[in-house]
Amino acid sequence: MAYRTENPATGVIEKEFTSATDADVTRAIERADAAFSTWRTTEAAERAAALAKIADLYDERADELAGVIGTEMGKPLAQAQGEVALASSIFRWYASHGEDLLAEEQLSIGDDAKSVVVTDPIGVLMGVMPWNFPHYQVARFVAPNLMLGNTILLKHASICARTAELIEEILHAAGVPQDAYINLFVSNEQITSIIEDPRVRGVSLTGSEGAGKAVAETAAQNLKKSVLELGGSDALIVLDDVDVAETAETVATARMSNAGQACNSPKRILVPSAMFDEFVTGVVETVDTMTVGDPANESTDMGPLSSIEARDDAIAQVERAVEQGATRHTGGKALERDGAWMSPAVLTGVTREMDAFTEEIFGPVAVVYPYDSIEEAVEIANDSSFGLSGSVWSKDTTKAEQVARRLEVGMTYVNEHGTTKAGLPFGGVRRSGYGRELGRWGFGEFANTKLVRVAK
């Protein structure tokens, strides 16, 4: 696995990084395991102070961090700045709430014994992180677990090596011991050996289904806890009382954010048949006026995809859908310039017989479906092997909430889609994975909820 910065806007390899040897991996596990005994006993207030300092450093270096994101995976500047701010907020939230989350809980069960539940760390954890949100997705795994007292080995995506180095640099500068957080440029085979090591107590992965299956299998074989956040094919249901033009613009913009490269992007847009044509027109008009260009330019709406391979995969999915009978209204073509450029696409006429109905399209492709009743909309929305999130849009929020509660997903929203905040749980069901991150729910995934009982 080659760790390198290959600028997706130009196709130029700007820097290559040295991968870890097997000896490096062995030593890293030893270091993290040794650090656990001291980091876990460090005062919670001191761990919280380190997380607060991390947030401060994120804020101070926001422009630098955002610029590197654009160079590595093509995210437009404003979106990259937003991601950096979100990562900062996660570290700050756990710095503020961590001590409360660690507080002992006194149980009252009607006897004379003292029964207390304490929250302990479990040891060394392995994190396997993706490229599409290179700071946010690391923060939501790292912040609660450092606050809890676990130590971390972190394998970032191979195209985000510079970001990985910067994260490690910031954490250490903030006071996290060097051996309590170790960045590793490792191969898939080395990841397996790390998970198999008895000193490593759990693993969290955000990524593809294939990677999730491999990690979960290894973890299960070694009786290790795992948390997986995998793919998604989120449904977005529009009800019949919305402002069509305004909602179409909002939804199209949401779908094309990060060039459509988000697990919880609204990939299936369900619209009442009576407004279908008008809505599709609005989506197409919005997409066609987007500026696809240099991620560093503040006027850019959409940058390149993360790699030429990712671009080609998304285009192939569009072409296959069209060959199978779908209608392409715009886009879905490679742009004639160096790098991983693609014009954003809008598809309709996708049926259950087509690959595009069941697969995740990880790119700037909006698929719009008509429906004739709420029952049909909910049926289509739930007719998916994924279950990450979904949303309902309406002026009648009471009605929309009732529909949203019927979606078989981990997260539902009304009049917004994919909102993530430090205090809200994040995660899915079905093929979208298992476990939760963020808030108090993420704090408990890699914790030993221990009963301490004292009989009189």
Image: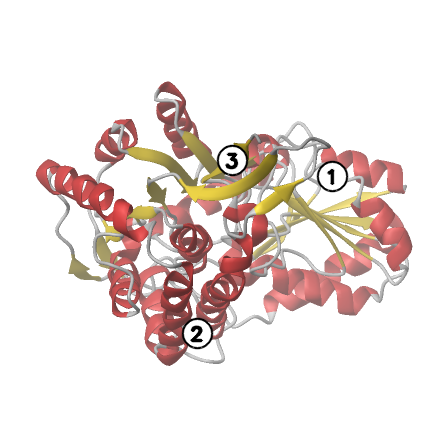
Which residue in the structure is indicated by mark 1?
381
Q: For label 1, count other residues whose C-alpha is less than 10 Å away and answer few (under 14), some (14-19) or many (20+).
A: many
Residue 77 marker: 2
Q: Which numbered disc, 2 or 3, marks the residue that appears first in the sequence? A: 2
Q: Of the residues shown, which amino acid type is indicated by label 2? A: Leu
Asked whether residue 1 appears in the rendered view, the answer is no
Image location of residue 272, percent across then percent down: 85, 49
Q: Is 281 or 295 nearer to us in this picture? A: 295
**393 w.r.t. 299: above or below:** above
Q: Of the residues shown, which amino acid type is indicated by label 1? A: Ala
Quarter containing the C terminus: top right
Q: Marks 2/3: CA distance?
A: 50 Å
Which one is closest to the eye, mark 2 or mark 3? 3
Q: Of the residues shown, which amino acid type is indicated by label 3? A: Val
- Left or right, 219 with respect to 11, comes to right
Q: For label 2, count other residues whose C-alpha is less than 10 Å away and answer few (under 14), some (14-19) or many (20+).
A: many
Which residue is found at the position 86% from the left and 56% from the top?
Answer: 275
**221 w.r.t. 90: above or below:** above
Q: For label 3, count other residues whose C-alpha is less than 10 Å away and answer few (under 14), some (14-19) or many (20+).
A: few
Q: Which numbered disc, 1 or 2, marks the residue that appears first in the sequence? A: 2
Which residue is found at the position 41% from the left and 22% from the top?
Answer: 220
Q: Tag 3's secondary structure?
A: strand
Q: Tag 2's secondary structure?
A: helix
Residue 452 marker: 3
